[in-house]
Image: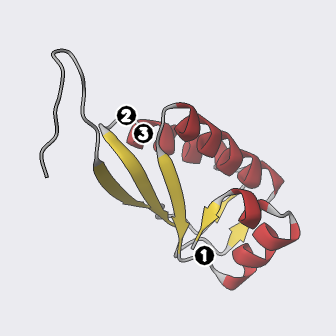
Amino acid sequence: MTLAVQAGETVRHRHTYAIWSHEEISSRNSADFQRWVERELKGNFTKMSIDLRKVAYVDAPGLAAIVRVSRLANYRGIEIEWLNLDPNVAKVMALTKLDSILNVR
């Protein structure tokens, strides 16, 4: 496959993977989570997978942070997929219908 690139044009095609290493995304750390994702989003890629395997608890501020970073990524042309959700976190995502809006796997 050959890509034709014009002068000054940036080609973005990489995929990055990150693991949130805390047990929750809540009012106590949602700002830290948001800053962490925002730092991760500064790379030159079009897809980011965020692994939440260690997260057993998400409250309303945590959900709001997830939505905010998802919107920011979308604005920047980056697809986020949310991976390895704990059953309780997956249940919260389903109850709030976020699983139908966000790319949850």
Q: Is residue 68 above or below residue 105?
A: above
Give the amino acid type for the residue marked by disc 2 in the picture.
Lys
Image position, residue 92 (x, y; %): 80, 71
For this orientation, the residue located farthest to the top is 8
Whether residue 81 sits left or right of residue 65 in the image: it is left
The residue at the point 64 percent across, 49 percent down is 29
Give the amino acid type for the residue marked by disc 3 in the picture.
Leu
Q: Earlier in the sequence, mark 1 or mark 3?
A: 3
Crowding at mark 1 (Cα within 10 Å: few <14, some 14-19, many 20+): some
Indicate the secondary structure of the residue bearing disc 3.
loop
Image position, residue 55 (x, y; %): 60, 71
Q: Is residue 36 above or below residue 83?
A: above
Q: Which residue is mark 3?
A: 41
Q: Which mark is residue 42?
A: 2
Q: Earlier in the sequence, mark 1 or mark 2?
A: 2
Whether residue 1 sits left or right of residue 61 in the image: it is left
The residue at the point 42 percent across, 37 percent down is 39
Q: Where is residue 89, by image quadrant?
A: bottom right
How was the colour assigned to the protein in this rendering?
A: secondary structure
The residue at the point 57 percent across, 74 percent down is 105
Image position, residue 52 (x, y; %): 54, 68
Image position, residue 75 (x, y; %): 57, 32
Give the amino acid type for the residue marked by disc 1 in the picture.
Leu
The residue at the point 52 percent across, 76 percent down is 53
Q: Which residue is mark 1?
A: 85
Whether residue 95 sits left or right of residue 85 in the image: it is right
